[in-house]
Amino acid sequence: MLPFIAPPDDPRQADWIAALQAAMPHETIVPLAALDDAARLTCEVAVVANPRPEDLRCLPRLRWVHSVWAGVERLLADLGDVNLPIVRLQDPQLADTMAEAVLAWTLYLHRDMPRYAQLQRERRWQPLDAVRAQDRCVGLLGLGALGSAAAARLVAAGFQVQGWSRTPRAVPGVHARSGDEGLAQVLATSDLLVCLLPLTPQTRRLLGDTAFQQLKPGAGLINFARSAIVDDAALRRALDSGRLSHAVLDVFDAEPLPADRWHWTHPGVTVLPHISAPTNRQTAARIVAANIAAYRQHGRIPPAVDRGRGY
């Protein structure tokens, strides 16, 4: 039997088990609670969605876990000293969904939608000057699978696109930069900045007071990565000062976002409920199924997360 391990109160557990079972008809997918002590001794692999560390410790012969999420920083933090290879979800559908969201919300800022919404609230009929896409520079922070897919959509839409990554990368149609100097150049020349970076010790609070001072005055920000990459207090200062014109935020340190947080009412913020790139259960289940089938056949664990890098 193959356990699916999620917090006991996760309302999506049954849906995940159904999707995984459909993708793996030769396996028996069950919640951890359905396994007796003898069955737990036979488990070498588990499929997980933010599992509790104690749930993994009760599977003494577990060799690796397959997460159904692309982001693994929470899993790495929660597991602590549970030293198991972690395979994260790498789903091309996720990259395509994220690229669609990046284009949609880039156009939202590009076409001044927040300002038009404010004009509507004020009952003011006031056309704003239009800017051509080719006259806007979009800066992408993160040029991995998600960033590369987003870049392709933005280039096709006619935007100037530049990007930054920790190490040098080549992406078609993108002026790619790396290193501290490259980051400063991207910040200083981007009209719209899109964050798609993984959360690592190096990217935590990367966008703070120093970065916002380097940012092109009046730029817009879209954060579809992780909340901890942005210093929340510095973000508010940048918005209040006008250094940053608007921020589209899809990730927060507490989710759901508590009703008393400043983001809800700030005129320079658009709050999204973590919907930029939801995981598709069917495509994710097929990828998990293929990895587990290969392991059953050859005994090879798929490429795991590099704990030093954090992804």
Image (cartoon, rainbow, N blue to C red):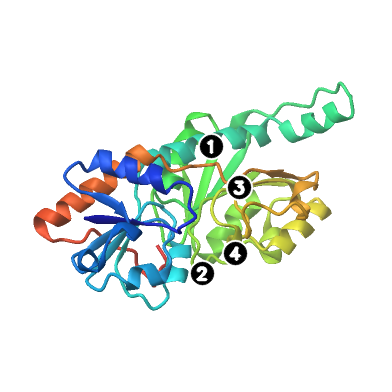
Say which of marks 3 and 4 sits in front.
3
Quadrant assignment, res 126: top right
Q: Are marks 2 and 1 in contact (CB under 8 Å)?
A: no
- Image disc number at residue 250: 3
**Label 4 sits on residue:** 206
* Amino acid of disc 4: Leu
Say which of marks 3 and 1 sits in front.
3
**Label 2 sits on residue:** 202
* Amino acid of disc 2: Gln
Q: Residues within 10 Å of mark 1 (few under 14, many from 20)?
A: some
Q: Are marks 2 and 4 in contact (CB under 8 Å)?
A: yes
- Image disc number at residue 101: 1
Along the viewing direction, whichever of 165 and 233 lies nearer the viewer: 233
Q: Residues within 10 Å of mark 4 (few under 14, many from 20)?
A: some
Say which of marks 3 and 2 sits in front.
3
* Amino acid of disc 3: Asp
